[in-house]
Image (cartoon, rainbow, N blue to C red):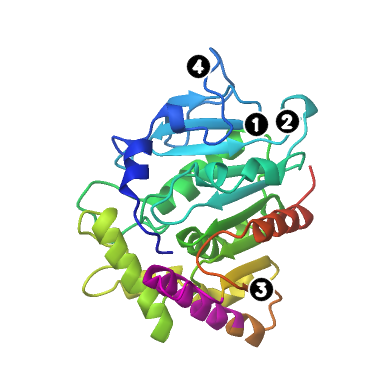
Amino acid sequence: MLTAHNPSRRSILRSAGGLTAAAALGAGGVLAAAPAASAVGNGFGLSIVDRNEHDHRMWYYRFRTDAIGWDPAVNVLLPDGYHTSGRRYPVLYLLHGGDQDFITFDAQDDIRGLTAWKNLIVVMPDGGRAGWYSNPVTTNVGPRSWEHFHMAQLLPWVEANFRTYAEYDGRAVSGFSMGGFGALKYAAKYYGHFASVSAHSGPANLRGANGDLVTHWANFSSAAVELGGGSVYGMPNWDQARVSADNPVERIESYRHKRVFLVAGTSPDPINWWDQANEGMVLRTQREFRYHLDRVGIPHEAHELPGGHFVRREMLERDINGVIARLRKA
Protein backbone atom coordinates (compact mmCIF):
# COMPACT_ATOMS: atom_id res chain seq x y z
CA MET A 1 0.00 0.00 0.00
CA LEU A 2 2.60 2.53 1.08
CA THR A 3 5.97 2.22 -0.59
CA ALA A 4 8.99 4.36 0.08
CA HIS A 5 9.62 6.74 -2.81
CA ASN A 6 12.90 6.07 -4.58
CA PRO A 7 13.74 9.20 -6.59
CA SER A 8 16.86 7.72 -8.13
CA ARG A 9 15.05 4.71 -9.58
CA ARG A 10 12.14 6.83 -10.71
CA SER A 11 14.36 9.36 -12.43
CA ILE A 12 16.09 6.59 -14.35
CA LEU A 13 12.90 4.83 -15.41
CA ARG A 14 10.46 7.66 -16.01
CA SER A 15 10.58 10.35 -18.61
CA ALA A 16 7.78 12.87 -19.20
CA GLY A 17 5.31 10.92 -17.08
CA GLY A 18 6.06 7.44 -18.44
CA LEU A 19 8.76 4.85 -19.02
CA THR A 20 11.00 5.11 -22.01
CA ALA A 21 10.74 2.35 -24.58
CA ALA A 22 14.18 1.15 -23.47
CA ALA A 23 12.86 0.22 -20.02
CA ALA A 24 9.50 -1.00 -21.18
CA LEU A 25 10.13 -4.71 -21.45
CA GLY A 26 11.70 -4.98 -18.01
CA ALA A 27 14.01 -7.80 -16.99
CA GLY A 28 15.00 -10.16 -19.74
CA GLY A 29 13.49 -8.06 -22.55
CA VAL A 30 15.26 -7.63 -25.85
CA LEU A 31 14.90 -4.28 -27.53
CA ALA A 32 14.04 -4.02 -31.18
CA ALA A 33 11.75 -2.08 -33.41
CA ALA A 34 8.14 -3.26 -33.52
CA PRO A 35 7.21 -5.32 -36.56
CA ALA A 36 6.22 -3.27 -39.56
CA ALA A 37 2.74 -4.74 -39.43
CA SER A 38 0.86 -6.07 -36.44
CA ALA A 39 -2.59 -7.47 -35.80
CA VAL A 40 -2.75 -5.49 -32.56
CA GLY A 41 -4.42 -2.14 -33.17
CA ASN A 42 -6.22 0.84 -31.69
CA GLY A 43 -9.69 0.84 -30.22
CA PHE A 44 -11.90 1.47 -27.18
CA GLY A 45 -10.48 4.96 -26.76
CA LEU A 46 -6.85 3.76 -26.89
CA SER A 47 -4.38 4.89 -29.56
CA ILE A 48 -1.03 3.12 -29.58
CA VAL A 49 1.87 5.59 -29.54
CA ASP A 50 4.71 3.16 -28.79
CA ARG A 51 5.05 -0.61 -28.97
CA ASN A 52 7.57 -3.44 -28.84
CA GLU A 53 6.57 -6.93 -30.01
CA HIS A 54 10.05 -8.38 -30.55
CA ASP A 55 10.15 -10.63 -27.47
CA HIS A 56 8.20 -13.83 -28.14
CA ARG A 57 6.38 -13.55 -24.81
CA MET A 58 6.43 -9.97 -23.46
CA TRP A 59 4.67 -7.44 -25.70
CA TYR A 60 4.64 -3.78 -24.69
CA TYR A 61 2.26 -0.98 -25.66
CA ARG A 62 1.88 2.66 -24.69
CA PHE A 63 -1.37 4.50 -25.33
CA ARG A 64 -2.82 7.93 -25.76
CA THR A 65 -6.18 8.07 -23.97
CA ASP A 66 -8.54 10.77 -22.77
CA ALA A 67 -8.77 8.91 -19.44
CA ILE A 68 -5.19 9.73 -18.38
CA GLY A 69 -3.26 12.99 -18.76
CA TRP A 70 -0.07 11.18 -19.84
CA ASP A 71 0.47 8.08 -21.96
CA PRO A 72 0.10 4.95 -19.80
CA ALA A 73 1.53 1.59 -20.81
CA VAL A 74 0.91 -2.13 -20.44
CA ASN A 75 2.97 -5.29 -20.67
CA VAL A 76 1.12 -8.32 -22.04
CA LEU A 77 2.92 -11.56 -21.15
CA LEU A 78 1.94 -14.30 -23.60
CA PRO A 79 2.20 -18.04 -22.97
CA ASP A 80 4.95 -20.09 -24.56
CA GLY A 81 3.52 -21.38 -27.81
CA TYR A 82 0.90 -18.62 -28.13
CA HIS A 83 1.98 -17.72 -31.67
CA THR A 84 1.60 -21.26 -33.04
CA SER A 85 -1.06 -22.94 -30.90
CA GLY A 86 -4.20 -21.21 -32.19
CA ARG A 87 -5.70 -21.64 -28.72
CA ARG A 88 -7.64 -19.18 -26.58
CA TYR A 89 -6.29 -18.54 -23.08
CA PRO A 90 -7.51 -17.34 -19.70
CA VAL A 91 -6.19 -13.96 -18.56
CA LEU A 92 -4.77 -12.69 -15.26
CA TYR A 93 -4.79 -8.91 -14.74
CA LEU A 94 -1.89 -8.20 -12.36
CA LEU A 95 -1.96 -4.77 -10.67
CA HIS A 96 1.10 -3.05 -9.20
CA GLY A 97 1.43 -1.17 -5.91
CA GLY A 98 1.99 2.48 -5.15
CA ASP A 99 5.07 4.21 -6.57
CA GLN A 100 5.56 1.24 -8.89
CA ASP A 101 4.68 0.80 -12.55
CA PHE A 102 3.79 -1.70 -15.23
CA ILE A 103 7.26 -3.34 -15.38
CA THR A 104 7.47 -4.11 -11.65
CA PHE A 105 6.26 -7.73 -11.78
CA ASP A 106 8.66 -8.41 -14.64
CA ALA A 107 11.68 -6.53 -13.31
CA GLN A 108 11.39 -7.52 -9.64
CA ASP A 109 9.15 -10.55 -9.23
CA ASP A 110 10.15 -12.96 -12.05
CA ILE A 111 6.68 -13.15 -13.55
CA ARG A 112 8.22 -14.74 -16.67
CA GLY A 113 9.73 -17.55 -14.68
CA LEU A 114 6.59 -18.10 -12.62
CA THR A 115 4.45 -18.46 -15.76
CA ALA A 116 6.89 -20.33 -18.01
CA TRP A 117 5.07 -23.03 -20.00
CA LYS A 118 1.79 -22.23 -18.28
CA ASN A 119 -1.32 -21.56 -20.34
CA LEU A 120 -2.09 -18.08 -19.06
CA ILE A 121 -1.93 -14.55 -20.48
CA VAL A 122 -0.82 -11.98 -17.87
CA VAL A 123 -1.74 -8.32 -18.38
CA MET A 124 0.27 -5.81 -16.30
CA PRO A 125 -0.94 -2.22 -16.78
CA ASP A 126 0.14 1.13 -15.43
CA GLY A 127 -1.97 2.28 -12.48
CA GLY A 128 -0.30 5.53 -11.45
CA ARG A 129 1.98 6.22 -8.49
CA ALA A 130 -1.04 6.65 -6.23
CA GLY A 131 -4.02 6.24 -8.54
CA TRP A 132 -5.73 3.73 -6.24
CA TYR A 133 -7.43 2.11 -9.23
CA SER A 134 -10.10 4.79 -9.03
CA ASN A 135 -11.62 7.73 -10.86
CA PRO A 136 -10.77 10.59 -8.47
CA VAL A 137 -13.24 13.05 -7.00
CA THR A 138 -10.87 15.92 -7.85
CA THR A 139 -7.67 16.37 -9.84
CA ASN A 140 -5.52 19.43 -10.53
CA VAL A 141 -3.28 17.80 -13.12
CA GLY A 142 -5.71 16.68 -15.80
CA PRO A 143 -7.50 13.34 -16.12
CA ARG A 144 -6.39 10.43 -13.95
CA SER A 145 -9.35 8.06 -14.39
CA TRP A 146 -7.54 4.79 -13.81
CA GLU A 147 -10.68 2.75 -13.19
CA HIS A 148 -12.14 3.88 -16.52
CA PHE A 149 -8.85 3.20 -18.32
CA HIS A 150 -8.62 -0.34 -16.96
CA MET A 151 -12.24 -1.48 -17.06
CA ALA A 152 -13.79 0.43 -19.97
CA GLN A 153 -10.78 0.67 -22.28
CA LEU A 154 -7.93 -1.76 -21.56
CA LEU A 155 -9.97 -4.88 -20.76
CA PRO A 156 -12.03 -4.81 -23.98
CA TRP A 157 -8.90 -3.81 -25.95
CA VAL A 158 -7.09 -6.90 -24.65
CA GLU A 159 -10.01 -9.12 -25.58
CA ALA A 160 -10.24 -7.62 -29.07
CA ASN A 161 -6.53 -8.04 -29.81
CA PHE A 162 -5.51 -11.29 -28.11
CA ARG A 163 -6.97 -14.80 -28.07
CA THR A 164 -8.68 -14.72 -24.69
CA TYR A 165 -11.89 -15.99 -23.14
CA ALA A 166 -14.06 -12.86 -22.88
CA GLU A 167 -16.15 -14.27 -20.06
CA TYR A 168 -16.38 -14.58 -16.29
CA ASP A 169 -14.54 -17.91 -16.12
CA GLY A 170 -11.81 -16.57 -18.38
CA ARG A 171 -10.56 -13.71 -16.17
CA ALA A 172 -8.76 -13.26 -12.85
CA VAL A 173 -7.44 -10.14 -11.11
CA SER A 174 -4.62 -9.97 -8.58
CA GLY A 175 -2.37 -7.29 -7.17
CA PHE A 176 0.17 -6.18 -4.62
CA SER A 177 -0.39 -3.44 -2.03
CA MET A 178 -2.47 -0.67 -3.64
CA GLY A 179 -2.95 -3.13 -6.49
CA GLY A 180 -4.30 -5.72 -4.07
CA PHE A 181 -6.94 -3.21 -3.03
CA GLY A 182 -7.61 -2.51 -6.71
CA ALA A 183 -8.09 -6.22 -7.38
CA LEU A 184 -10.57 -6.60 -4.51
CA LYS A 185 -12.42 -3.49 -5.65
CA TYR A 186 -12.65 -4.44 -9.33
CA ALA A 187 -13.72 -8.02 -8.59
CA ALA A 188 -16.64 -6.83 -6.48
CA LYS A 189 -17.65 -3.67 -8.33
CA TYR A 190 -17.54 -5.48 -11.69
CA TYR A 191 -18.93 -8.72 -10.35
CA GLY A 192 -19.44 -10.52 -13.66
CA HIS A 193 -15.91 -9.90 -14.92
CA PHE A 194 -13.59 -11.95 -12.67
CA ALA A 195 -13.88 -15.50 -11.31
CA SER A 196 -10.77 -15.18 -9.14
CA VAL A 197 -9.41 -12.32 -7.01
CA SER A 198 -6.20 -12.07 -5.00
CA ALA A 199 -4.65 -9.45 -2.72
CA HIS A 200 -0.97 -9.72 -1.81
CA SER A 201 -0.49 -7.34 1.13
CA GLY A 202 -3.48 -5.34 -0.11
CA PRO A 203 -5.81 -3.48 2.30
CA ALA A 204 -9.38 -4.76 2.35
CA ASN A 205 -11.52 -2.19 4.18
CA LEU A 206 -12.09 1.57 3.72
CA ARG A 207 -14.13 2.15 6.88
CA GLY A 208 -13.96 1.59 10.62
CA ALA A 209 -11.05 2.21 12.97
CA ASN A 210 -8.60 0.58 10.57
CA GLY A 211 -10.34 1.23 7.26
CA ASP A 212 -10.59 4.97 7.85
CA LEU A 213 -6.79 5.04 7.89
CA VAL A 214 -6.73 3.44 4.45
CA THR A 215 -9.13 6.04 3.02
CA HIS A 216 -7.18 8.87 4.61
CA TRP A 217 -3.97 7.45 3.16
CA ALA A 218 -5.54 7.05 -0.30
CA ASN A 219 -6.53 10.72 -0.16
CA PHE A 220 -3.19 11.91 1.21
CA SER A 221 -0.98 9.88 -1.13
CA SER A 222 -3.02 10.68 -4.22
CA ALA A 223 -2.98 14.39 -3.38
CA ALA A 224 0.79 14.33 -2.84
CA VAL A 225 2.05 12.38 -5.86
CA GLU A 226 -0.82 11.70 -8.27
CA LEU A 227 -3.42 14.46 -8.39
CA GLY A 228 -1.61 17.71 -7.63
CA GLY A 229 -3.58 18.34 -4.46
CA GLY A 230 -6.75 16.63 -5.65
CA SER A 231 -7.99 13.45 -4.00
CA VAL A 232 -9.45 10.04 -4.73
CA TYR A 233 -12.36 10.24 -2.27
CA GLY A 234 -12.66 13.95 -1.51
CA MET A 235 -11.09 16.15 1.17
CA PRO A 236 -11.93 17.24 3.78
CA ASN A 237 -15.34 15.62 3.25
CA TRP A 238 -15.47 12.20 1.66
CA ASP A 239 -17.78 11.28 -1.19
CA GLN A 240 -19.48 8.66 0.97
CA ALA A 241 -21.27 6.92 -1.89
CA ARG A 242 -17.97 6.46 -3.71
CA VAL A 243 -16.23 5.08 -0.62
CA SER A 244 -19.04 2.55 -0.15
CA ALA A 245 -18.99 1.58 -3.83
CA ASP A 246 -15.24 0.85 -3.64
CA ASN A 247 -15.14 -0.79 -0.20
CA PRO A 248 -14.65 -4.58 -0.23
CA VAL A 249 -16.25 -5.03 3.20
CA GLU A 250 -19.43 -3.32 2.02
CA ARG A 251 -19.67 -5.59 -1.04
CA ILE A 252 -19.16 -8.96 0.66
CA GLU A 253 -21.82 -10.83 -1.30
CA SER A 254 -20.01 -9.92 -4.51
CA TYR A 255 -17.25 -12.39 -3.59
CA ARG A 256 -19.59 -15.38 -3.50
CA HIS A 257 -18.70 -18.06 -6.08
CA LYS A 258 -15.28 -16.51 -6.67
CA ARG A 259 -11.86 -17.84 -5.75
CA VAL A 260 -10.56 -15.44 -3.06
CA PHE A 261 -6.86 -15.50 -2.15
CA LEU A 262 -5.33 -13.25 0.54
CA VAL A 263 -1.79 -12.76 1.85
CA ALA A 264 -0.65 -10.53 4.74
CA GLY A 265 2.53 -10.22 6.77
CA THR A 266 2.53 -10.59 10.55
CA SER A 267 5.93 -9.20 11.51
CA PRO A 268 6.92 -5.95 9.79
CA ASP A 269 10.41 -4.64 10.41
CA PRO A 270 10.23 -3.25 13.98
CA ILE A 271 12.63 -0.39 13.23
CA ASN A 272 11.01 0.55 9.91
CA TRP A 273 7.94 2.71 10.59
CA TRP A 274 7.05 2.59 6.88
CA ASP A 275 6.84 -1.19 6.91
CA GLN A 276 5.00 -1.13 10.24
CA ALA A 277 2.38 1.31 8.95
CA ASN A 278 1.94 -0.57 5.68
CA GLU A 279 1.57 -4.14 6.78
CA GLY A 280 -0.02 -3.38 10.12
CA MET A 281 -2.89 -1.70 8.29
CA VAL A 282 -3.06 -4.50 5.72
CA LEU A 283 -3.20 -7.23 8.35
CA ARG A 284 -5.94 -5.56 10.37
CA THR A 285 -8.16 -4.79 7.38
CA GLN A 286 -7.70 -8.26 5.85
CA ARG A 287 -8.75 -9.81 9.16
CA GLU A 288 -11.87 -7.64 9.14
CA PHE A 289 -12.60 -8.67 5.57
CA ARG A 290 -12.13 -12.35 6.37
CA TYR A 291 -14.46 -12.03 9.37
CA HIS A 292 -17.22 -10.82 7.07
CA LEU A 293 -16.51 -13.55 4.50
CA ASP A 294 -16.78 -16.14 7.26
CA ARG A 295 -19.94 -14.51 8.63
CA VAL A 296 -21.82 -15.14 5.38
CA GLY A 297 -20.12 -18.44 4.54
CA ILE A 298 -17.96 -17.39 1.58
CA PRO A 299 -14.91 -19.68 1.20
CA HIS A 300 -11.48 -18.11 0.85
CA GLU A 301 -7.80 -18.97 1.13
CA ALA A 302 -5.86 -16.72 3.49
CA HIS A 303 -2.21 -16.73 4.51
CA GLU A 304 -0.63 -14.80 7.38
CA LEU A 305 3.12 -15.13 7.08
CA PRO A 306 6.23 -13.73 8.79
CA GLY A 307 7.63 -10.51 7.39
CA GLY A 308 6.34 -7.17 6.24
CA HIS A 309 5.16 -5.40 3.09
CA PHE A 310 6.58 -7.19 0.05
CA VAL A 311 5.63 -9.72 -2.61
CA ARG A 312 6.29 -13.27 -1.45
CA ARG A 313 7.42 -15.24 -4.47
CA GLU A 314 6.10 -18.55 -3.17
CA MET A 315 2.68 -16.98 -2.57
CA LEU A 316 2.62 -15.39 -6.03
CA GLU A 317 3.45 -18.77 -7.55
CA ARG A 318 0.73 -20.46 -5.47
CA ASP A 319 -1.70 -17.77 -6.56
CA ILE A 320 -0.88 -18.17 -10.26
CA ASN A 321 -1.34 -21.93 -10.04
CA GLY A 322 -4.66 -21.40 -8.25
CA VAL A 323 -5.80 -18.95 -10.93
CA ILE A 324 -5.03 -21.49 -13.66
CA ALA A 325 -6.91 -24.20 -11.76
CA ARG A 326 -9.99 -21.97 -11.33
CA LEU A 327 -10.26 -20.49 -14.82
CA ARG A 328 -11.33 -22.06 -18.07
CA LYS A 329 -8.54 -24.09 -19.63
CA ALA A 330 -6.72 -23.05 -22.79
C-alpha distance separating marks 4 and 3: 43 Å
Q: Say few, some or many: other residues with alpha carbon within 10 Å of mark 2 (under 14 / 14 to 19 / 20 or more).
A: some
Compared to 27, does 196 lie above or below? below
C-alpha distance separating marks 2 and 4: 20 Å
C-alpha distance separating marks 1 and 4: 15 Å
Marks 3 and 2 close (CB-CB < 8 Å): no
Residue with the mark numbered 2 = 82
C-alpha distance separating marks 2 and 1: 8 Å
Residue with the mark numbered 3 = 302
Q: Is residue 286 magenta?
A: yes
Q: Which amino acid type is marked by label 4?
A: Ala
Q: Residue at x 57, y 71 (%)?
A: 264
Choose the circle earlier in sequence order: 2 or 1.
1
C-alpha distance separating marks 3 and 2: 32 Å
Residue 67 visible in the displayed image: no
User: Closer to the camera: disc 3 or disc 2?
Assistant: 3
Q: Magenta segment range?
A: 266-290
Residue 237 lies, in percent from the top left, at: 23, 75
Choose the circle earlier in sequence order: 1 or 4.
4
**Quadrant housing residue 63:** top left
Residue with the most extreme top position: 36
Residue with the mark numbered 1 = 57
